[in-house]
Image (cartoon, rainbow, N blue to C red):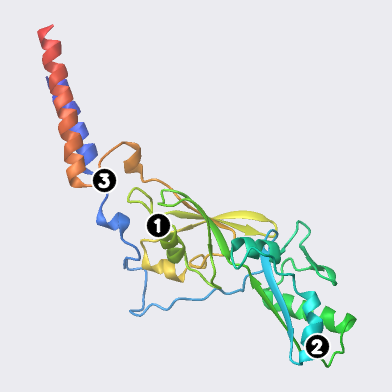
Amino acid sequence: MKQIIVCIVVVLGLLSTSCITQKDVVYLQDKGTVINDSLQIQALATPYRVQVNDLLSVNVKAEKKEINELVQIFNPTTTAVGDTDQSLYYNGFTVDLHGNIEFPILGEINVLGFTTDEVEVKVKDVILQKYLKETAKIFVTVKLSGLKYTTLGEITNKGTKVLYQDRVNILEAIANAGDILDTGDRKDVLIVRQYPNGQKIHHIDLTDISAMQSEFYYIQPNDLIMVKPLKRKSIGAGQTATQTLTTIASIFSVLVSTYFLARNL
């Protein structure tokens, strides 16, 4: 009987600390890490630079009608799939493994490591030097064809998502994926990010309001957001007090039944 009592005490102690608390699930809590009362979100220090496999949307226009008709040859031909993800895939420019895009008429243009603003200038210069007078007023617009990212782990809707915005913070990205499950570890969310020399893993605590000042608060194209399970989940404890009490009652019932069966043998 003493062994059963010891087991019950151990189980009670373990399960009493295994409930998922409010501090585990509430985002952006004030943990005393912010000095000023009014928190200012810091923008990324450096703009995004084009990486391999990025999908770019490039459009060329001119101020004068006759020149505008001429520069249409540099724009991709619209397919019949409509204004969808498929349309962006077929009409956009994918950056190949060498960092180039294959541009109509102009041929290959290297864009790896350039910002979209720099790519605009680069395309414009090539068109003016090869096909038009330098005084011609043309306008080149280059955008990423959506901000693509992937979510894995303890999150409602895992998989690849695309948001058609220039800037998306990690909370918006997670909300778009259905939010983190209660069993997910919000205190140590992993971000796998691509760089010209490879991938790096970064960590961010989304329960701390200081996360808004992190350089990883805004996601970048092709980011992989991974949410690990809480340790509480691995031991099979309940997420709420009610669930935990139910688990305790079940374990207690099994232990008592086992004891009396063993005693009657």
Looking at the picture, which amino acid does disc 1 mark?
Gly
Looking at the image, is mark 3 or mark 1 earlier in the sequence? 1
Query: Looking at the image, can residue 236 be seen?
Result: yes
Residue at figure coordinates x 51%, y 65% from the top left: 216
Circle 2 residue: 67
Residue 21: x and y, percent?
Answer: 25, 52
* Residue at x-position 83% and y-position 93%: 135
Tag 2 and tag 1, C-beta contact below 8 Å: no
Question: Quick check: 65 above or below 223?
Answer: below
Mark 3 vs mark 1: give the one in front: 1
> Mark 2: few, some, or many residues within 10 Å (few <14, many ≥20)?
some
Earlier in the chain: of badge 3 and badge 2, it is: 2
Residue 249 lies left or right of residue 30; in this view the side is left
Residue under the image location 53 percent in, 72 percent down: 167
For the view shown, which residue lies furthest in the front direction?
Answer: 80
Q: Quadrant of residue 12?
A: top left
Viewer-proximal residue, 9 or 114? 114
Secondary structure found at label 2:
helix
Q: Residue at x 75, y 58 (%)?
A: 96
Tell me where residue 120 appears, x and y as whole percent.
73, 78
Amino acid type, mark 2: Ile
Quarter of the picture holding the C terminus: top left
- Residue at numbered disc 3: 239
Mark 1 is surrounded, within 10 Å at the Cα level, by few (under 14), some (14 to 19) or many (20 or more) other residues, namely: few
Relative to residue 242, is residue 132 depicted above or below?
A: below
Q: CA distance from mark 3 to mark 2?
A: 65 Å
**Residue 256 at what x, y percent from top left?**
13, 22
Residue 92 visible in the current orientation: no
* Residue 178 tag number: 1
